[in-house]
């Protein structure tokens, strides 16, 4: 079974006067995990898990969470990005994935199709 690292924004950000807060971003991460699952793979989304018991506002805990995420990335087959916006944390994850030779794939269009049509077409390869 493929293990997919879910790479999406966590912290609050703004695009054209629209604010995307942490709660919104976590909801999106959970939806992305569902998408990965429906594609037949195992989602790995550290920002949807570690933030339940670690505090992003505490620099040590944020650093530890990022380090833990990179450790999980090492066991993943691919990293999927889901957003046109790339946060600082996402950029670090993508850079780490490239260093580890983990393929990075933007699946935003496929995810949006899944939201519209309710099914996945040929996302996972055997």
Image: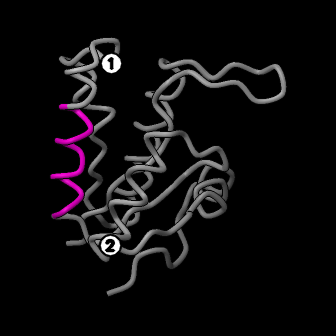
Viewed as shown, does residue 88 lie left or right of 75?
right
**Local SS, label 2:** loop
The residue positioned 54% from the left and 23% from the top of the image is 24
Within the magenta stretch, is there residue 69? Answer: yes
Residue extending furthest right? 16
The residue nearer to you, when weighing 49 against 73, is 73
Does the segment drawn in magenta span residue 8? no
Quarter of the image containing the C terminus? bottom left
Number of numbered labels in the structure image: 2
Left or right, 3 with reference to 114: left
Decide which of 30, 7 is in the foreground and name it.
7
Determine the residue positioned at 48% across, 43% down: 8
Q: Is residue 76 left or right of residue 99?
A: left
Are the residues flagged by discs 2 and 1 in contact, CB closer than 8 Å?
no
Residue located beneath label 2 in the image? 102
For marks 2 and 1, the one nearer the N-term is: 1
Residue 25 % position (x, y): 51, 28
Instruction: Identify the residue at image location x=16%, y=64%.
Output: 75
User: Where are the magenta residues, as a range?
Assistant: 64-74
Task: Tell me the quarter of the image containing the N terminus.
Answer: bottom left
Residue drawn at (24%, 57%) of the image: 73
Where 43 sits versus 101, above or below?
above
Q: Which residue is mark 1?
A: 56
């Amino acid at each position: 079974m493929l293990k997919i690292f879910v790479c999406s924004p966590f912290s609050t950000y703004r695009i054209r006067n629209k604010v995307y807060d942490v709660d919104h971003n976590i909801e999106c991460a959970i939806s992305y995990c569902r998408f990965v699952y429906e594609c037949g793979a195992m989602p790995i989304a550290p920002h949807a898990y570690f933030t339940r018991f670690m505090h992003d506002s505490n620099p040590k805990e944020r650093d530890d969470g990022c380090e833990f995420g990179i450790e999980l990335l090492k066991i993943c087959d691919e990293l999927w990005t889901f957003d046109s916006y790339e946060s600082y944390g996402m950029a670090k994850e993508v850079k780490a994935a490239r260093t580890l030779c983990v393929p990075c794939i933007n699946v935003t269009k496929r995810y949006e199709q899944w939201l519209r049509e309710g099914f996945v077409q040929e996302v996972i390869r055997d």
